[in-house]
Image (tube, grey):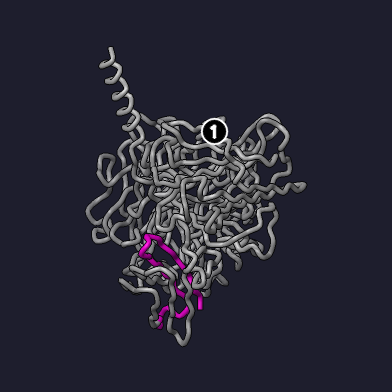
Amino acid sequence: MKKISIIIIIAIAFTISSFTQELTPYQGSRIFWDINSQTTVFQPGNYARMIELQDGRLLAVAEALGGISITFSSNKGNTWTSPRLITSPPNKVFYAVPDVIQLSDGIILIGFNPRPHAPYSPDRLFGIRVVRSTDNGETWSDPYFIFDAHYTFDNGCWEPAFLELPSGEVQCYFANESEYTNSNEQNISMCRSFDKGITWSTPIIVSFRQGYRDGMPVPLLLKDQSEIVVIIEDNGWPGRGNFVATTVRTTLEDNWTKGYVDGNSSKRSMIFQIPPPTNIVSAAPYIRKFPWGETIASYQSNENRISNDLQYFDMYVVIGDERARNFKAKSAPFSLGNDKHAIWNSISVIDTGIIVALGSIGPPYKSNDVVMMKGYPLRQAKANYGVINVDGTKSLDEKWTTSNASQLYFGHITKNKATVDFLYDEKYLYLTSQIIDRNIINTGLDNDGIRFMIDADNISGSMPETGMYSFFFDTNGTVKFQRGNHGIWTTDNNVSEILYAVDIKSFYYNIEAAIPWSLIGKSAPPFGERMAIAIEIVNKEEYTLTKEGIADVDNNASWTWLEFQLIPRQSNKNICVNEDNSVIKTFVNNNILYINSPVMIKELSLFSLEGKLIDKKKEVGLNFHIPIPIPFYKGIVLMFSLENGEIINKKILF
């Protein structure tokens, strides 16, 4: 019997150890949406697209004012000019679904889709057109012809989208059912222009699944320029029967010369790392890329909605790798209730990597406004060296790691804007958060507050283990402290050394906390050691308790948490933390770019404002200078790959 007991104990120990093995830490960015940046761009409006112009302004285009209209922002989307109509449809025709691109030489193209009203007649065709501006959007040409389909709705063409290749070739992709007059099929077609959008070739088919409807294409050239990737909606995946966001692709060298991607091609794939359930729709997709190469996609979906009717859909955003595959880190920037929808959405990447979500938002079957929200991609949170007085109030002499102590943003789910930031010194890890809340609950069992979790020993496991810690800072001024312990969280009442203060105002509260390093098993700040964190904002209402965390984070599995780094104190004197969280100083003098970094730069890449690679330098070091090529005196984008693994992007306008 004793021998059997020993065997059982060994088996149990083996089972526990097998479940708690170290896993590969999460790779890739997560988006932190700033609910305070939500702004109306068109009122009313529909089907908006946005780009950042070479002069730094934003240009948005939409169906508005009875045709295709534009508006500009000179402050990264905080405010917008009054929308201006640039092209109006003829009688009994509607201009729909615009798309916009600025070519490398500065010419702006806006494409759109003429759609005749019923009753249909042969003199009014469904088509694709484009207008051009050669003066940065001030004046616009008459429409140029790209393609015409048939005159009936069932045999039309739809949704143009543009791509410029390094050769200067401009491509216009669109959905086309004019070739299938006896079926409901649809392909993705593409026309080419070699004169900056004035004349266009006859279309070729780039994607077609027999018996189904490939639709709503948006093209992208990967950062390494090896492949053209087109995101589409595909309703032909076996066992599904609804639209799924999908990519089709070709090499840049081939450029669609070897035929189209059919339903069985290896060049066709769902975008998701983990495919959604078969009943989930991911339609009307859009795709862009970050300056460092990661890709990002949006789509409209019935997930978590009360109806499969499009008029109840919401917008979702996912992040892919540099090959435009394995999309994950799903978030819903607007996170609407079922009394509103966000449909016909798009995304734009501006500045050094800020993402802008654009949605047509309104009640089901009512008119929409075009609304935007900014999001900030992050792979790693940081803490500078500093000391504060833990009193819950923010004073001018407190210098947190980022401007306005706003390193992490929350609130798109709870609808209460929350910001989080960090500091550290030899004794404490400091945390601060400000949460806008007009109904602060602090007198019950379940109160408002913030939960902070840290994997201090790089456990990177699938369940709570020794070396993982959790702190819940309650609005009633108490702290709940837990330690990971063989797969569960166990409460530790030893909280006397934790400094915590909450300052509650009428419509917001501030918290400040200092966690002793000794409490999480450290005798000193753990420089150079990998750590990871998770955050959860808890919002209590009368009948509900809402929790909002970081995309793809499992509170019990620290391999999913956000990496966390301490910036060494001795480097702080050389560090200038800007709005983009950059720690690298740059300045320009006599067309020479000077760079100073506190961390070794392994690789420096210079891009033009429109994303073309200008130059690349390896093993740069700490200090460096380089002449700015004459054609790029308007501005450049820098991408730094640092020795510590961090990637930093900076835009410089001259």
285 relative to 64, above or below: above
Please check the rendered image and state whether residue 250 is part of the magenta-colored stretch, yes or no. no
Q: Secondary structure at mark 1?
A: strand
Percent x, y of residue 391: 69, 53
625 relative to 407, above or below: below
- Could you tell me if residue 152 is visible in this image? no
Q: What residue is rendered at 56% in x and 68% in y?
A: 57
Residue placed under numbered mark 1 in the picture: 491
Please tell me which residue lies in front, 340 or 451. Answer: 451
Please tell me which residue lies in front, 310 or 272. Answer: 272
Check disc 1: other Cα within 10 Å, few if <14, some if 14-19, many if 20+. some
Q: Residue furthest right?
A: 506
Q: Residue furthest top?
A: 1
- Could you tell me if residue 357 is visible in this image? yes
Please tell me which residue lies in front, 623 or 528. Answer: 528
422 relative to 463, above or below: below
Looking at the image, residue 461 sits to the left or right of residue 366; the answer is left
Q: What residue is rendered at 44% in x and 33% in y?
A: 485
* Image: magenta residue range: 628-654
Percent x, y of residue 601: 37, 69
What's the residue type where badge 1 is placed? Thr
Percent x, y of residue 14: 30, 28
Quarter where residue 91 is shown: bottom right
Please check the rendered image and state whether residue 653 is part of the magenta-colored stretch, yes or no. yes
